Amino acid sequence: MRYRDLRGVLATSAAICAVAMATPASARIKTFDVPAQPAATGIPELATQADVQILVSAAAVRGRNIRAIKGAMSVDQAVRRAAADAGLRVVSSDGRTYTLALQTSAAPAAPSADRAAASESGVPAEIIVTAQKRAEAISDVPIAISAFSADSLQEQKIESGAELVRGIPNVTFSKNNYSGYNFSIRGVGTKAVSATSDPGVAVSFNNVALIRNRLFEQEYFDIERVEVLRGPQGTLYGRNATAGVVNMITAKPDLDDLTGSGKVEVGNYKSMRATGMINIPLVDDVLAVRAAGAWTSRDGYGYNMATDERIDGRDLWSTRLSLAFKPSPRLRINATWEHFNENDDRLRTGKQLCHRDPGPSTFPGVFDPNQPGVLRTLDPLESGRLSQGCRQGSLYDDGAYGSPNGLSIPFIAAGQMLGLIGFSEPLMFPDGSFNPNAEYVRFLKYGIDPYNVEQSRDLRTVSSLFPAQYRAKADIFALDVSFDATDALTITSQTLYNEDRVYSLQDYHRFSLQPTFNDSNGLFTYSGCSFSNPAGCSAPSEYSNFTPGGIFTDPQLGPSNSVAGVEISSSESWQFSQELRLVSDFDGPLNFSAGANYLKFKGLNDYYLFFNIVTMLAQGYYNASQNIGECLAFPSNCMTVDPNPIGSLNGDGHNYFRNRNPYELESIAGFGEVYWEATPNLKLTAGLRYTEDRKKFTPWRSQLLVPGDGYGPAIRFGRNGANLPGVSGSTGNPTCPSPTIR
C-alpha cells in the first residue's frame, strides 16, 4: 500500500464498486478551426476546441509547428494529426486526456523547472491550467504553481482543502477559534479572527474568489483540477491573494459523450463514502448537463468519557448541477449550482493542554503577623488570583495534561468571595449573642478549585457535558460566458452568487470539573437577621431553592453541580460578484489580459460564551444584593437574564457574553497584464491593478454582567425562572465578629 490513512477510516477491508459508461473518443466528431501556428500555442488551442486535456512537455514542442486543422473530424484524428505535424506521438489516451511525447525514443530531459513542477504537483508537469485566467501549459506559466488532477488527488488521498498540505511545499493549515481557519503559503496567512479581516490566501471557485467558503469541511468530488498558486497574485486575483490562491476547477459537461461513474467505500468507524456523476448530452456539440454528488458518514475518532460515546463524527453531502451550452463555435456558456450540507458532531477545536500554574505561595511585602520578618503563606484563593492559569512547559510532558488554575478566573473567585446564600447555623442565638459556629456559605466552596483535575493522556479523549453540534450549509450559483470576438480576442463574463451558513456548539472545557456548588438546603437567613430581631436569624435562607442539593439550574445550560461552560460560534453571509475580462491570443510576441470586477458581501458573525457561574452572580448577587442596591431600588438597572434555552435565545442577556459582528463590503477593481515573449526562452509580464474597498462595520455592545436596560426590560430570575424574593435588612454590623467561609 502506497499510502496509509493515519486516521484508520479504511483500515479494515473495504468494498469498492464502480460503474462507467463512455462513448469511444474516436467516435466524437467536432468541427475544428485551428490555424497553422507554433505547436506551443496550437496544441493548447486544439485542446480547447476538442474539450480535452493534452499533456506534453514544453521542451518537446519548442521550435515545432503544426499545420491548420479545419473542418469536421473526430477528436482522436485531430489530436493525432497535430501530434504528427509536431513530430510527436500519442503515449496514452483515455478519451479525455492525451499524453504526447517525442517520436524518438531518446527524448531530451525536461528542464529542471518542469521537473520541479511535476514533483510538487504529483502529476505530469504539462497539465493545462488557467492560473493566469487563460488556458496554458503549466510550464509556460511564470508562477510557482502546483496543479492536481482528479486522479492525482485520489492517488495522494487528498480529499479536502485542508489536506493539500500533503502535496504542496511551504503550505500549512490550521483551525483558529470561532469558525475560521488559516491557510498559509510560505508562512504568509492570517491569524486574525476579526470579521472584517481578510485572509492571506484567496480561495476561488472556477477562478472566482469566495470570501466565505467551506474549504475546511467540504470534500472534493467530480473536479477537473485544483491549482495552488504560491506568491502574491494581486494583479489577476485581487484582494486576499497576498500569499497565493487555491483555485478549484470543477468538471464541465461534455457536449458529446454520455458518461457516468460511481464509487462506494465502506470501512471501520461505520464509515461510508459515496460519489457519483452522470453526464448527458442533450444536443450533440451544443447542449449538455452534468450532475454529481458526494456523501460521507462515519462515527467520530474521538471519545467522550462523560457520555461514553464516540464524538467528532461526520455526516455531510454535496451536490452539483452543471449546464454547458455552445450555440456557436464562438460562444460558450456554463452554469453551475453547488450545494453543501453538514449536520453532525464535528469538534471545532480539539483537546486543550495546560501546565497548571498554582501561583506563588508567598508575596513580597506580605508578612505573617505572628512571625515578624516571615512572609505569610497565601491561602489558595490568594495564590490563585496571582496565577496565570497555565504556565510555560513542554506539550510532550505528562504535566501538559493538567488544567488551568480556576481560582485565577475572576468569576470563580467572585463566586467564592461575594455570592452568599446563607449561614450554616443561625448567626445569632435568640438572646442576641453571636453563634461562633455560624459559617458563611457562598455560591462556591471556598478555596476549592473546580478546575484542579487531570485529563486523559489520549489526545482524542475528552470529557464533555454538552454534545458538540456542527451545522453548515453553502450554495453557489455561477454563470460563465465566453465569446470569441475575433480569432485572437476573447471576452469572458463570470457571475457568482454565494450563500454560506455555519453553526457550531461545543463544551468550553472538554474536561470534567470538580463539584463545587454549595447546597442551599438547610441554610439560615442573613437578610432578616439583626440585633433588634435575633430570633429572625433562625429563619430559613431565602436562597434555599437556589442550589438545592448543590445543583444550580441555568436557563441556558440546565442543571449542574459544578461550573459549566458552552461556546457557540455562528456565521451567515451572502456574496455577489461580477467580473469581465478581455484576453488576447495574437500570433506575435505581445499579448494582454484586462478586466474589471465588482463584489458585494454582507455577513453576520455571532459568538456566544455561557457560564452558569456568571448567571449565578447575575441572579443571586447583582440582582438581589442590597450591597449594590440599584437593582432593588431601580428594577430597570438590574442585569438582564435571558430566560430562554440555547435553541431560542433572544440575544439580550447580560448573563452571557455575546460578540455580534455585522459586516458589509463593497469592492470595485480594474486590472490588466501585458505579456511580451522576447525570445522563446524569455517572457516578460507587467501588471497593474486598482482596487477600492468600502467596508462597513457596526459595533455591537458586549454586556456581560453589566447592569442596565440597553437590551430590553431587566428581570430577576431564580432557579427555574422563578423570581427571587426581595432582599432587605442588614447582613451584620461592623462590630460583629467575622464568621468563617465555606
Image: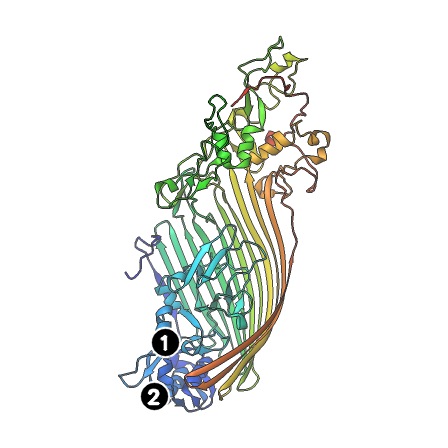
Residue positioned 67% across, 13% down in the render: 533
Q: What is the secondary structure assignment of the residue under circle 2? A: loop
Q: Are marks 1 and 2 in contact (CB under 8 Å)?
A: no
- The residue closer to the viewer here, 409 or 367, is 367
Which residue, given by chain and number where applicable, does mark 2 sit on? 87
Above or below residue 587? Residue 695 is above
- Relative placement, left or right, of 28 versus 702 is left
Which residue, given by chain and number where applicable, does mark 1 sit on? 114
Res. 581 visible in picture: no
Q: Nearer the viewer, mark 1 or mark 2?
A: 1
Q: Residue furthest left?
A: 105
| Marks 1 and 2, the one that precedes in the sequence | 2
Q: Give x and y (percent) for residue 742.
A: 51, 23
The picture quadrant where one finds residue 649 is top right
Q: What is the secondary structure assignment of the residue under circle 1? A: helix
Q: Name the amino acid, label 1.
A: Asp
- Relative placement, left or right, of 695 versus 312 is right
Q: Residue furthest top?
A: 431
Residue positioned 70% across, 39% down in the render: 709
Badge count: 2
Label 1 Cα crowd, 10 Å radius (few <14 / some 14-19 / many 20+): many
The picture quadrant where one finds residue 353 is top left
- The residue closer to the viewer here, 476 or 24, is 476
Above or below residue 700? Residue 327 is below
Residue positioned 47% across, 23% down in the render: 372
Above or below residue 408? Residue 231 is below
Q: Give x and y (percent) for residue 252.
A: 48, 72
